[in-house]
Amino acid sequence: MNTKVLVAPSPHVHSGDSIQKNMYGVVFAMLPALLFSFFYFGLGALVVTLTAVASCYLFEFLIQKYILKTEVTINDGSALITGILLAFNVPSNLPIWIIMIGALVAIGIGKMTFGGLGNNVFNPALVGRVFLLISFPVQMTSWPVSKGLTSGYIDVETGATPLAIIKEGLKSGQSLSSLMDKIPSNMDMFLGNMGGSMGEIAGAALVLGLIYMLIRKIITWHIPVAVIGSVAILTGILHMISPEAYAGPVFHILTGGLLLGAIFMATDYVTSPMSNKGMIIYGVGIGVLTVVIRVFGAYPEGVSFAILIMNAFVPLINVYVKPKRFGEKRK
Amino acid sequence: MAGKKESTFINMVLVLFIVTLVASAALGGLYELTKEPIAAAKLAKKLKAIKEVVPEFDNNPSEEMYSVEMPTGDLLEFYPAKKGSELVGTAVKTFTTNGFSGYIWIMVGFKPDGSINNYSVLEHKETPGLGTKMEPWFKTTDPAKAKCSILGKNPGTANLTVSKDGGEVDAITAATISSRAFLDAVQTAYNEYNKQMEGGTK
Amino acid sequence: MTNKDIFLRGFFKENAVFTLLLGMCPTLGVTSSAINGLGMGLATTFVLIMSNLVISLVSSFIPDKVKIPSFIVIIASFVTMVDLLMAGYVPALHEQLGVFIPLIVVNCVVLGRAEAFASKNKMVPSIIDGISMGLGFAMALTMLGAIREFFGSGKMFGVTLFNETYGMLVFVLAPGAFIALGYLIAFINRVRKA
């Protein structure tokens, strides 16, 4: 059954790879970011992660067993990844019932409606996150201030993300340079000392995960580099045109969910293109859309929307940018 | 279904002419019939908004309406509410362009001393669940949220900006931009209202 | 085909929304609450009945080449009538449905029934077809509106069932319309198969 859900076309030289092996590799790569989030947000992060993972398993089991009446495949590790990614994408003080709705949407709407793992068009965790963001905007944008291990589950003290500070400030007519004083230093942001979703704050830990996945050949470099590169170039150009109106590339790369999205969510096997060229088109699309939403849109953050939009283009990209078959001549 | 007309030029013109003639005659008649109820409904809606924001009155404020053109080219409309000949309040239809997306139109009622009697949000495109809360938010009677309410405050003496900017009003949770915009519209209304009162025109 | 067959076909078997997937614009656009869905559905029903009635009477006099323009004029007249009447007598609902009332003109259900049924049938079956299609449409819109209102704001026909803070806002917004409609159609297909 497990081999049946691999729907990518040949060639498939079997090298002992399996869904489980790759999935648990991804989970292992997420560990540093997970530990960082426990470190910064304490108990809340742990509660959110456990709830998200447990509900993802539960809903996958219930839907497969009682609604679809198919073989239950919850051991393939994909529910674990969806659960952790969902937790990564929400504030660490999100009420438990909202997380459970998110898990139900991620698994139910995002994955099972399309026919389960391998058939879903959109990244399930992101479907869950965007659903929650639109449905519960207050709870989803009240970020607890990171206080280290001592903080409890529900924390009253909340702060804005650096992206929201900039967006709001510019909207009310303040200058960018005065706003830059209000946000953490680049080093702080790289190490995760800022407001934000659980998994997106610690750039260093995410990069560690990326290096691990590249070495283990779980993913290739194309998507993360294309996403981050296009964001860097585009924001760089905007910053050069008007330094007072647009923040620079370093700021855009380190803040929000860009690293998390580029490394863990855009690279999801099922919802990203198959060929290297396709991956680069897809990655650049995500980067450009992210910048457009962040700079010109209503929401301060646009990575999750950008990835979902490009997910929808993946089938098209796969049709037009096919991997070259072995021995095929260039036309 | 026998006897279908041939698609000749004359037939087509004739049929279309008759169809449109009957249709337009019917519509014209109905328009005359519904003209009055529609106008009445529109007026009732406006009066309802005015009634909501000023103390009880017995004149027809929309007849005594006057307006001031703002730099954006939009009109600020003033509806004086009177009981007998005494001015009991003025409803000001005001707006702001500082909202999250597009215009926000609100009706604010001032008592003659300049304090805010009540307000009503007429039109906006703010984010549902965030900015949309401005209708109940700034007129809460919950004592725990006393810092949210603007009722009874006088924009001339009180600093009606969000507490984040050093003002006296607590912004809507997670919707500071909409809150700022809302208060900006109230302030605009007050400034113009004040000018009118000092000018002694009414 | 008996009149009863015509009625059942239009109401359920060939339901405009669930089977024919016609009239998607108002279906998705106005169903943010049950009452809006019902209002829109009944307005469309009225237009359907009247246009079916008139078209079944006059279609034999209309040359083929100007059939569609004539039908559109007739439909548009009834839509404008509904628009004026609603603006005059139920202004609150009229404001809610707003731009979608004039858009009944281009609702494929109305022109579709005029062309496919009323122009080829006698008056009585045409009226029955208009009633059944219209009520089927109204039922679908009310169901969708009720679902969206319930999940989105915890209400049903304006009656609060649970605290609004637990409502999922997405259902009141456009994406929720698509999600709810998709699952509703899936559910109905399943019921039909069983």
Image (tube, rainbow, N blue to C red):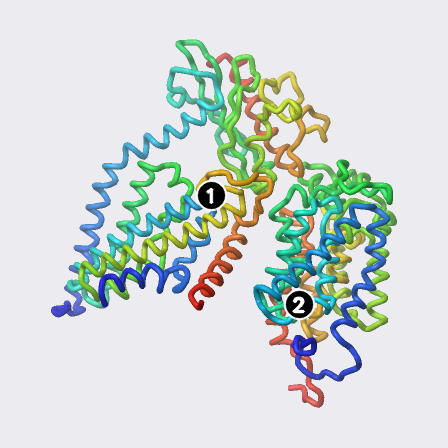
Task: Name the residue beneath numbered marker 2.
Answer: A271
Q: In this view of the protein, which residue sits in the foreground, A281 or C133?
A: C133
Is residue A288 at least partly visible in the picture?
no
Image coords of residue C157 (percent x, y) = 44, 42
Front: mark 2 or 1: 1
Task: Name the residue beneath numbered marker 1.
Answer: C156
Specify the amino acid type for callout 2: Thr
Q: Quadrant of the N terminus of chain A?
A: bottom right
Which residue shows up at 78% across the image and 42% down it? Answer: A153
Q: In this view of the protein, which residue sits in the foreground, A188 or C19?
A: C19
Q: Is residue B99 left or right of residue C126?
A: right
Q: For residue A189, which numbered disc appears in the image?
A: none
Image coords of residue B153 (percent x, y) = 61, 18
Compared with residue A286, is residue B87 higher up or lower down, i.e. above or below?
above
Specify few, some or many for label 1: CA neighbours under 10 Å numbering under 14, 14-19, or 20 or more. some
Is residue A269 at least partly visible in the picture?
yes
